[in-house]
Image (tube, grey):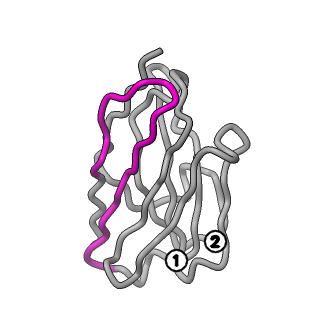
Amino acid sequence: QAQLQESGGGLVHAGDSLRLSCVASGRIESMDYMAWFRRTPGTERVCVAIIHRLGDYIFHANFVQGRFTISRDNAKNTIYLQMDKMKPEDTAVYYCAATSSGITTDVNQYMFWGQGTQVTVSA
């Protein structure tokens, strides 16, 4: 099994920054690609960013381009999501996820999930 644990969520104001962390444990070798998703009430989870285990492939969704940055530290089995210039519409529960199914934004292709961390951005 593999476990993912997010941290770093909280309440910020518009324009502020926040950094989320996700520590992986267990079957690390099953996590070729790790990603951040987010979900707002009543909606499906949406992919925010993806990073390959070696860090040589990175994807950011259009709606966070230029504001959010995904990165990883393999020595710590951790990925990060640096969120800058935050907006109220970034308010969501953010989830860390992992897959060995290749590059995909399809939530159904991710077999490992963290429990999520709440991020709230006030106007």
Q: 93 and 99: which one is in front?
A: 93
- Identify the residue shown where x is 62% and y is 51%: 106
Q: Which mark is residue 79?
A: none
35 left or right of 78 in image? right
Q: Residues within 10 Å of mark 2 (few under 14, many from 20)?
A: few
Q: Secondary structure at mark 2?
A: loop
- Identify the residue shown where x is 52% and y is 79%: 53
44 left or right of 102 in image? left
Q: Is residue 91 magenta?
A: no
Q: With respect to residue 118, does 80 lie above or below? A: below
Extent of the magenta region: 7-27
Residue position for label 2: 102
Quadrant for the N terminus, please.
bottom left
Q: Is residue 21 magenta?
A: yes
Which image quadrant is residue 24 in?
bottom left
- Identify the residue shown where x is 51% and y is 66%: 71
Q: Amino acid at mark 1?
A: Asp
Coordinates of residue 80 in the picture (x, y in percent)? 43, 60
Residue position for label 1: 32
The majority secondary structure of the magenta stretch comes to: strand
Which image quadrant is residue 21 in?
bottom left
Q: 106 and 73: which one is in front?
A: 73
Q: With respect to residue 32, does 43 lie above or below? A: above
Which image quadrant is residue 29 in?
bottom left
Q: CA distance from mark 1 to mark 2?
A: 7 Å
Q: Amino acid at mark 2?
A: Gly
- Identify the residue shown where x is 58% and y is 74%: 52
